[in-house]
Image (cartoon, rainbow, N blue to C red):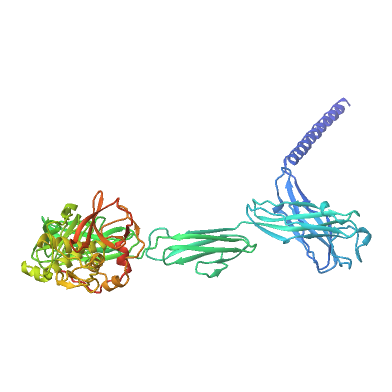
């Protein structure tokens, strides 16, 4: 009996242990549940405006919407899912459901017939089947401006106002409560809600929709490196309310992403139109299209067992590389350790445009010496297995082009030309087209005689006869004139200055004479006129004079001799042009100094004065003189390049001798 009792106690004790264990497990589960529940974030949805709204059949219904947030006050309004089946054209009771996860709220919308009293929207939870009682009052809220307002991201919303009247309470605008959830820093659709309760306790609410838009127009180039092809402008529109885009050619497109292809440099403007009325304009500049080919020439020499090819090339964006006889080089001077008779050269610029030229080692040409006697410069050159075909003259290191002036054709190994003060660069060319290296000579202002004293004005004898008596001829002088002007440059103001200096200084230094002054005298010859110096009756001014030119006749003749049509200068006189103030900086060689009744030609500059050539009067004829920079009263400067660009150019000019 005793053993049974003990066994029974033992069993009871075991059962108690199991029960306690189960209770502990349950407590742990419950504890974990409550801890998790407390740690989780709760979400809440709140309606904007009333939970019950009544609208008239056929009117516009603007839903006030709802807002949502979690226990950490994070705005979740944009995550709300809205189910709306309101039909404003059919009477009835409708529900709008606002859902977020597992929670939802609803709004009741009743559509009723509009009473004949006035236009209003009332909010009443009672069934309103027939009419709204006049004794409760009928409230009308009317928005000023648009019911939907579009603003750009970060733009400001400006309230356009409203009115609120009630058939019983009258003007109740001050009682209207305006709430909104507009965030101009975040694109989205927002509501401004206008709510008012009349004295009968009936609430009326309407809303205005605010749409915050991100409107962005992005432009970029498909290729930013230099190219000789087309360039695409990549267009990307970031705008949910995009309407259309006006391309630079005026064509419109509704594509938000496209590529606009251009064939030439320039600034291209795109104009975006937004459905909300926003217009955004953006431009992009294309400057990497280059279709201009380089210019290239080359020469080949064989020296000390090497063929040396020197390439002269120019390009508006720069030379990229040189290909000589099929091999690529980065420098323009290529030395090959063998004799290569014929050399093929291709020059490329940075955009891939190219120019080609050929040069053969057939002869060698060299400028032996450049000397001067006053303003007269004598050049001597020699060749091997060839002959001299011409000389290039330039006031800078750039080799002139045959068609742009600065080139004198000749078959002689030496040549004499007139050069103005400054540094002159000289090249020689043989009959195969090979060009020598350059040599220089520098002349200063002392080569131009300032006083011209000791020289006689030509009187009573034709210039042509006088030169013949001195073992020369007018033809020989005019050849010197023509090649000197060509050496200075046709259609340039230095060419005009060279013509004036040649006429005055060469006649004075070589033959001891000056051209007479003739009042009203004009001469349209290229070169000196053979009849200067004869004694003629002046048809304009009474009396007999020694024929020559007056001041503006001399200046006109000088510009005519650089290639301007003389009749154009004569008929379209520059004498009354406004001009620039006389300053050292405004005047250059080839410009004209003018005052009332007199003009002179600038042919040089010193530290304190312009050196001028002018026809001065009957007693002194044509002279060189100084015009000091401080002598400004009544004087102006006419730019020589303006004369050259204004008047017509000669169709032909002596080619040189």
The image quadrant where one finds the N terminus is top right
> Residue 507's image quarter?
bottom left
Residue 567, image x, y percentages: 27, 73
Which image quarter: residue 373?
bottom left
The residue under the point 59% across, 64% down is 273
Q: State the residue lying farthest toward the top.
A: 2
Q: Quadrant of residue 482?
A: bottom left
* Residue at point 91%, 61% (across, down): 127
Closer to us: 138 or 628: 628
Residue 50 can be seen, yes or no: no
Horizontal and vertical percent position of residue 566: 26, 72
Pinpoint residue 38: horizontal percent, then vertical percent.
Answer: 75, 39
**83 or 164: which is nearer to us?**
164
Q: From this view, report whether residue 612 is shown above or below residue 248.
A: above
Question: In the image, is residue 350 above or below residue 538?
Answer: above
Locate the C terminus and report the quarter of the image it occupies.
bottom left
Q: Is residue 89 left or right of residue 442?
A: right
């Amino acid at each position: 009996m005793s053993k049974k009792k003990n066994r029974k106690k033992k069993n009871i004790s075991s059962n108690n242990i199991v029960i306690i264990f189960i209770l502990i497990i349950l407590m742990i589960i419950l504890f974990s549940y409550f801890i998790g529940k407390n740690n989780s974030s709760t979400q809440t949805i709140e309606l904007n405006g009333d939970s019950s709204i009544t609208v008239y059949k056929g009117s516009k219904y603007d839903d006030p919407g709802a807002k949502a947030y979690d226990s950490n006050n994070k705005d979740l309004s944009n995550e709300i899912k809205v189910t709306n089946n309101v039909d404003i054209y059919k009477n009835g009771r409708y529900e709008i459901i606002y859902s977020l996860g597992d929670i939802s709220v609803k709004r009741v919308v009743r559509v009723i017939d509009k009473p004949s009293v006035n236009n209003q929207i009332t909010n009443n939870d009672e069934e309103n089947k027939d009419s709204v009682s006049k004794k409760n009052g009928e409230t009308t809220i009317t928005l000023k401006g648009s019911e939907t307002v579009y603003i750009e991201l970060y733009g400001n919303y400006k309230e356009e106002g409203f009115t609120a009247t009630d058939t019983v309470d009258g003007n109740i605008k001050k009682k209207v409560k305006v709430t909104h959830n507009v965030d101009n820093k975040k694109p989205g659709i927002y509501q401004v809600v206008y709510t008012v309760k009349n004295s009968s306790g009936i609430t009326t609410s309407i809303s205005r929709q605010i749409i915050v838009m991100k409107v962005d127009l992005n432009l970029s180039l498909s290729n930013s490196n230099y190219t000789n092809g087309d360039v695409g402008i990549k267009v990307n529109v970031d705008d949910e309310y995009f309407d259309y885009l006006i391309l630079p050619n005026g064509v419109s497109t509704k594509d938000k992403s496209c590529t606009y292809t251009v064939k030439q440099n320039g600034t291209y403007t795109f104009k975006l139109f937004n459905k909300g009325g926003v217009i955004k304009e953006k431009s992009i500049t294309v400057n990497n299209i280059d279709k201009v080919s380089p210019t290239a020439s080359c020469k080949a020499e064989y020296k000390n067992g090497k063929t040396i090819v020197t390439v002269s090339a120019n390009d508006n964006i720069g030379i990229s590389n040189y290909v000589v006889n099929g091999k690529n080089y980065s420098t323009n001077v290529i030395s090959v350790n063998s004799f290569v008779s014929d050399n093929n050269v291709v020059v490329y610029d940075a955009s891939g445009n190219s120019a080609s030229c050929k040069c053969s080692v057939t002869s060698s040409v060299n400028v032996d010496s450049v000397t001067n006697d006053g303003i007269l410069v004598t050049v001597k050159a020699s060749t091997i297995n060839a002959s001299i075909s011409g000389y290039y003259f330039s006031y800078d290191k750039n080799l002139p082009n045959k068609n742009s002036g600065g080139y004198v054709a000749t078959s002689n190994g030496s040549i004499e030309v007139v050069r103005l003060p400054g540094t002159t660069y000289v090249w020689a060319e043989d009959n195969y087209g090979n060009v020598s290296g350059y040599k220089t000579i520098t002349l200063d202002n002392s080569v131009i005689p300032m006083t011209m004293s000791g020289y006689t004005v030509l009187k009573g004898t034709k210039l042509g006869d006088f030169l013949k008596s001195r073992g020369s001829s007018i033809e020989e002088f005019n050849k010197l004139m023509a090649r000197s002007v060509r050496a200075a440059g046709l259609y340039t103001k230095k060419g005009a200055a060279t013509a004036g200096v040649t006429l005055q200084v060469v006649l004075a230094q070589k033959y001891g004479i000056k051209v007479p002054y003739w009042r009203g005298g004009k001469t349209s010859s290229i070169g000196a006129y053979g009849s200067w110096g004869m004694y003629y009756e002046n048809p304009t001014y009474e009396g007999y004079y020694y024929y020559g030119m007056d001041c503006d006749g001399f200046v006109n003749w000088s510009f005519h001799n650089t290639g301007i049509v003389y009749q154009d200068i004569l008929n379209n006189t520059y004498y009354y042009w406004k001009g620039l103030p006389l300053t050292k900086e405004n005047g250059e060689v080839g410009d004209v100094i003018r005052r009332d009744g007199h003009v002179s030609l600038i042919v040089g500059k010193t530290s304190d004065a312009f050196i001028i050539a002018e026809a001065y009067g009957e007693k002194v004829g044509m002279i060189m003189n100084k015009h000091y920079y401080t002598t400004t009263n009544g004087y102006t400067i006419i730019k020589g390049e303006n004369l050259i660009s204004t008047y017509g150019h000669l169709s032909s000019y002596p080619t040189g001798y």
